[in-house]
Image (spheres, helix red, strand yellow):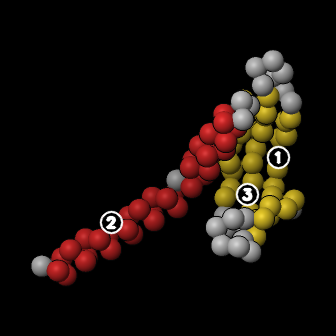
Amino acid sequence: MKRVWLLGIILFIGLGITLSYTYRTVIAENIGERWCKSRDLICTFEVEKLSISEIKILDLNVGKTSIPTILSAANIALDLSWPSGLTPNITRA
């Protein structure tokens, strides 16, 4: 009986990891939109690629209600490094 529970827990964790990896770009877009909203910004963008070492963002537009476009970029590529565990350092590629 304990083995069945252990197997179930392992499968559940494996499924969670698989889904998180599969939907990582959607999750990143959602986090970015919430970050913008918390700062009263209107942001639209598409995360094209997200890996442990880089992120590529397409069609970035940042604005406010009073200023529709503060910043825009067609294509952004950033390098990520992880010197302190869960907090990345971001540098331009």
| Residue, disc 2 | 12
Residue visible at 52% across and 61% down in the picture:
21
Front residue of 5 and 38: 38
Which of marks 3 and 1 precedes in the sequence?
A: 3
Q: Find residue 42 and report its horizontal and vertical position in percent.
A: 72, 29
- Mark 3 neighbour density, 10 Å: few (under 14) some (14–19) many (20 or more): some
> Which label belongs to residue 75?
1
Is residue 70 visible to the viewer in this orientation of the structure?
yes
How far apart in space, not on screen, are marks 3 and 2 (Cα)? 28 Å
Amino acid found under the numbered disc labelled 2: Phe
Work out whether 64 lies above or below 76: above
Q: In this view, does 64 lie above or below 51?
A: above
Residue underneath mark 3: 55
Q: Which amino acid does label 1 sit on?
A: Asn
| Quarter of the figure with residue 77 | bottom right
Crowding at mark 1 (Cα within 10 Å: few <14, some 14-19, many 20+): some
Q: Distance between the residues labelled 1 and 3?
A: 11 Å
Give the residue type that dot 3 points to: Ile
